[in-house]
Amino acid sequence: MTVKRALISVSDKTGLLELAHGLVELGFELIATSGTGAYLEEHGLQATRVEDLTGVAEMLGGRVKTLHPSVHGALLARRDDAGDQASLAEHGIEPIDLVIVNLYPFRHVAARRESSESDVVEAIDIGGPAMVRAAAKNFAAVAVLVDPERYGFVLDELRESAGDLSLDTRRELAAEAFAHTAGYDIAIANWFSDTESFPERQLGELVKVTDLAYGENPHQRAAYYMEAGARRHLLSMVTQHGGKQLSFNNLLDLDAATRLVQEFTVPACVIVKHGNPCGCALASTPEEAYRNALACDPTSAFGGVVAVNRPLSRDLAALVAEQFVEVLHAPGYGDGAIDLLREKLRNLRLLESDERRRPTPGERDAHRVLGGMLIQDRDTESEDRDTMEVVAGAPPTEREWGDLLFAWRVVKHVRSNAIVIARDTATVGIGAGQMSRVDSTKLALGKALSPVAGAVLASDAFFPFADGVQAALDAGVRVIIEPGGSKRDDEVIAAVEKSGGTLVFTGRRHFSH
């Protein structure tokens, strides 16, 4: 295929001049819409205006520019179809071989707080998607470019083959073009349905960020995708300073670790293994927080993901280097910390996050099931102390309240049935993922490496029987926090009162399946 005529209509001018100059050097005739044509002329490039092609000036304030047979006939005509070629000749239409289009910046306009509804509506491109789809449909003869990052690739191939693009390249570009217009329409549809809590059709576009080393198991391929238009995502503003390529499981654990560590404003450390925290602590320094988090369950922490919410000092790097860690995530690194970690843990995936934006309000979680998706609001709720009710025993002391609120935040991030035992704003024992709450309680008690006397316990849902509560009280736990709401709450309350403990109801559960 020898490309001779190129139609250009772009909102994003990134890389356009280099591409246009390259096309002219290869003997292309350039055709452009008014805004793009003016931009090219300002930079010394001549382009035929679309209105000269169609014989009709742009109208309706620019809403109609390219919607004309002289454009779409030139794009859709099959080169090997005699009837199509006769129609072009009858109407004096010359084929167009290359289309360079990117669409009105709808997402950008829709995301601006100051944009009115009419501003957003005018940012809906009509002619652009029509041209892109027409060119992509006729990929047997026409090439279409929608991504400025692909300009260099296409220009290189044109130069190497004296103006030819292979069929494989045109097919690849067509696939990108249809994906591009599909994503564009999804963004528009979601904007129109934004007033509904859960619209009849749930639409989304995913854009690949990176390939992963492997999936849940080494024989499974995997990649990480972000939601198109998301303000932030798991790896946004993240730099990897060293170590192996991230895996599927690394990102699952990283997501769990960063969600939990972001709950706290004081120095905090979280260690996650297989999707669950195996240690979490708050302290006056990140070093102390790490020591206390590790002390909760050093065996499970082996090969875990560590996240801190403060820059990581060289001293803390030295502590981390004493353990086997898969991933380390921090908002910065002090002098010498990265070099030390690279030397001691060569395979450590060393991540530095410069992301300072808060999560987007209204974000939702999705779980894939057979043939569909379960979608729900993200559990971002954190109950205030003044909404909680002491239903048994003496009111907690201020120190106990601190531990209760800490444990209540942590338990929200543990897989159900979830039990967290804490003391001095550090986890002491964690029970996760058991089919019965009493088993989770016994697991948390068994995991505790230090006596639990005087510790507090948090349960993500109510105790259906008094047995779990009694096991914790017998081990020395003195204060328990749970949602309440069981038919046997009276039995649970009675068990706590008889043991001289304290029971606090929050009124809301935090299952995490």
Image (spheres, grey):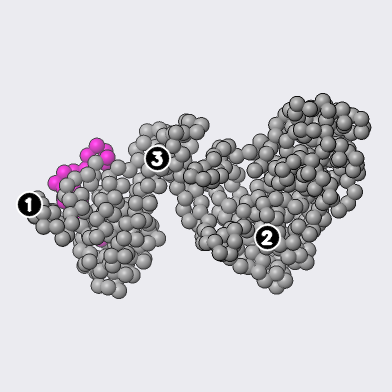
Q: Residue at x 83, y 28 (%)?
A: 491
- First in sequence, mark 3 or 1: give its number: 1
Does 50 lie within the magenta span?
A: yes
Residue identified by numbered label 3: 188
Which type of secondary structure does the marked residue at label 2 adopt?
strand
Q: Which mark is residue 328?
A: 2
Say which amino acid is labelled 2. Leu
- First in sequence, mark 3 or 2: give its number: 3
Q: Provide the residue span drawn in magenta.
A: 45-63
Say which amino acid is labelled 3. Ile
Does 116 lie within the magenta span?
A: no
Tell me which corner region of the image, top left, top right, bottom left or bottom right, holds residue 387.
top right
Q: Residue at x 73, y 65 (%)?
A: 324
- First in sequence, mark 1 or 2: give its number: 1
- The N terminus appears in which quarter of the rendering? bottom left
Residue identified by numbered label 1: 90
Which type of secondary structure does the marked residue at label 3 adopt?
helix
Task: Give the alpha-carbon distance from disc 1 to disc 2, as whole Å.
Answer: 68 Å
Q: Which mark is residue 119?
A: none
Say which amino acid is labelled 1. Glu
Find out whether the residues at labels 3 and 1 contact each other: C-beta distance under 8 Å. Answer: no
Where is residue 480 shown, x and y percent of the image? Answer: 82, 36
Where is residue 133 shown, x and y percent of the image? Answer: 29, 50
Mark 2: few, some, or many residues within 10 Å (few <14, many ≥20)? many
Task: Give the alpha-carbon distance from disc 3 to disc 2, as whole Å.
Answer: 38 Å
